[in-house]
Image: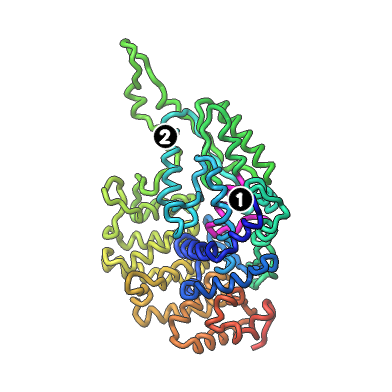
């Protein structure tokens, strides 16, 4: 393949335009965090952004990425996941390079590589297939079909997959797939794109760390990187597919191996682990398990010579079917409004996530016993509040359910009022993670419907004032997402940008440690002119400033 033509394709205005739309859609609909100010600016200034990117890429070798930042959504109640927020211009370029590669490589993946596949029908809207409508249902159906045919299921996943990806190995894989040299201009520039410049807060000092470079791993939190993960594991997938008497499938880092014999399965997982180790990866031992379905496969021979299952066997649950992933709407468990796990902190986050699913999944046919909006009572509000505080791995979902309960017309007035009180309590609680507070505020201020109104606008003056009083704290908390959402709310509080800048500056100058909040957004927030007025405070981060 001509690597020069490949580069020209990736930096063409046509590709950048499509990729900007892909990036904006994913950022708003799929990512764990987005900045409304950045998104609104990008939507209103698409042509300007494309003009600027074309200029920056006139000499692609001179292209320099802006600084990205890290944020940390809870993964469980005890651990966090590092995610990387790439400024929209650089995200557009990243998407354009991935989009260019995907057009040549996606068709070469095995069919049982289910996630992050190139979207073909709605290619102008999505880069990759919609996971909830296409890729995840296919993954679940494939497992069900094999659970009915096979006796053994091995479930496993790759430990810290995205964080462990070697840039060198990834570039070598792309070089092989596109048949271009490692020293081609396309791969030299893409190597620069992989090495994202980062800033993040230090939890211990509560100040900004010095800028660093991402030298290993993918940028978690950006949807296009899922396709790069598929390239990384392409030869692994083909190796596993060739193993006789097994059925292999993968969804991101989740792997399933079906077989009829235990020895066949164990041999397959040994081959898998050996291959992963050559890529700097390994299986997660804690999440590797073997399910053997013997009872449901037992058959007796009747006197007539026909095969049938005895009555007891028919009643037994298929162990393999119980282990496979379920479709999003398939949920059969029910919970009391205040569930038993609430008093047991040792319960896994999965119980809290299941509770959220139970009270949120749409069930138009009443096939599954799921809670309807009008059935939500104050006890459900109490449970959601406790999940946000104690099972923080489920706080992303729980925060939306709480806000929905506070404002949806189908919910009783008593439950709505209860939810509003909990919201105002949670945004001040030290038990709630910074990300949990951000998600609540995000849902409150998000513009919705044809009239573009937010739930926050339905608060009375006293309720709004309680939120406004927290903004100074949020602006100076060591959490990028809280810093940014506080600026967004300031912009809604004041009609004048001048007043916003004055208020923000006064807050920052009162702090012992100066924070660097809008610095990385310099290019995208020029229209607000924050940087000019805050340069005095922001140019020397981590320094004490006398008031």
Residue 123 in sight: yes
Front-most of 178 and 125? 178
Q: Where is residue 360 in the image (x, y as percent from the top left)?
A: 35, 56
Residue drawn 46% across the image and 75% down it = 44
Q: In this view, does 451 lie to the left or right of 200?
A: left
Residue at image mark 1: 160
Residue drawn 30% across the image and 66% down it = 408
The answer to which of marks 2 and 1 sits earlier in the sequence is 2
Q: Where is residue 314 in the image (x, y as percent from the top left)?
A: 34, 27
Q: How is the image coloured?
A: rainbow
Q: Is residue 232 magenta?
A: yes
Front-most of 176 and 214? 176
Q: Give the range drawn in magenta.
A: 214-233
Instruction: Give the distance between the C-alpha atoms of the residues marked 2 and 1, in whole angstroms.
Output: 29 Å
User: Which SS type dominates the magenta stretch?
Assistant: loop
Q: Where is residue 74 in the image (x, y as percent from the top left)?
A: 53, 59
Residue count near mark 2 (Cα–Cα under 10 Å), binned few <14, some 14–19, many ≥20: few
């Amino acid at each position: 393949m001509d690597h020069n033509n490949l580069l020209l394709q990736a930096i063409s205005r046509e590709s950048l335009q499509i990729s900007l739309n892909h990036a904006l859609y994913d950022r708003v609909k799929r990512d764990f965090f987005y900045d409304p100010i950045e998104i609104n600016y990008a939507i209103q200034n698409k042509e300007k952004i494309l003009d600027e990117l074309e200029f920056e890429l006139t000499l692609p070798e001179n292209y320099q990425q802006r600084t990205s930042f890290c944020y940390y959504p809870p993964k469980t109640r005890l651990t966090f996941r590092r995610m990387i927020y790439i400024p929209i211009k650089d995200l557009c370029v990243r998407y354009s390079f991935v989009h260019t590669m995907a057009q040549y490589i996606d068709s070469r993946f095995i069919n049982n590589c289910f996630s992050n596949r190139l979207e073909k029908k709605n290619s102008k809207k999505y880069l990759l297939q919609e996971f909830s409508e296409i890729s995840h249902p296919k993954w679940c159906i494939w497992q069900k079909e094999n659970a009915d045919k096979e006796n053994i299921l091995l479930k496993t996943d790759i430990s810290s997959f995205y964080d462990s990806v070697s840039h060198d190995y990834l570039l070598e894989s792309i070089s092989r797939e596109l048949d271009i040299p490692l020293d081609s201009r396309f791969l030299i520039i893409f190597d620069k794109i992989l090495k994202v410049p980062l800033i993040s807060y230090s939890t211990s000092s509560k100040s900004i760390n010095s800028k660093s470079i991402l030298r290993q791993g993918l940028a978690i939190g950006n949807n296009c990187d899922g396709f790069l993960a598929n390239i990384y594991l392409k030869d692994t997938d083909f190796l596993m597919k060739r193993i006789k008497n097994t059925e292999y499938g993968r969804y991101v880092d989740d792997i399933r191996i079906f077989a009829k014999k235990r020895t066949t399965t164990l041999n397959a997982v040994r081959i898998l682990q050996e291959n992963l180790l050559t890529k700097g990866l390994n299986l997660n031992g804690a999440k590797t398990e073997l399910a053997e379905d013997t009872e449901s496969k037992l058959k007796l021979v009747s006197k007539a010579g026909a095969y049938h299952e005895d009555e007891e066997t028919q009643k037994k649950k298929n162990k393999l079917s119980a282990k496979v992933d379920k479709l999003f709407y398939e949920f059969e468990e029910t919970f009391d409004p205040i569930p038993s796990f609430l008093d047991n902190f040792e319960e896994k986050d999965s119980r809290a996530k299941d509770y959220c699913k139970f009270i949120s999944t749409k069930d138009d046919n009443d096939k599954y016993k799921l809670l309807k909006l009008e059935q939500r009572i104050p006890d459900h509000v109490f449970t959601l509040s406790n999940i946000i505080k104690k099972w923080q791995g489920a706080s992303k979902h729980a925060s939306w359910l709480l806000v929905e309960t506070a404002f949806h017309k189908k919910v009783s007035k008593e439950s709505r009022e209860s939810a509003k009180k909990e919201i105002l309590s949670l945004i001040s609680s030290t038990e709630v993670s910074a990300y949990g507070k951000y998600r609540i505020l995000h849902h409150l201020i998000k513009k919705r419907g044809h009239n573009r109104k937010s739930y926050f606008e339905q608060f009375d003056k006293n309720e709004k004032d309680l939120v406004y009083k927290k903004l100074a704290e949020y602006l100076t908390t060591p959490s990028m997402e809280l810093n940014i959402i506080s600026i967004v709310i300031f912009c809604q509080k004041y009609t004048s940008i001048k007043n916003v800048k004055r208020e923000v500056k006064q807050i920052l100058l009162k702090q012992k440690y100066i924070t660097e909040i809008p610095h990385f957004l310099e290019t995208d927030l020029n229209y607000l002119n924050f940087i000019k007025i805050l340069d005095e405070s922001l140019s020397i981060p981590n320094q004490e400033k006398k008031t």
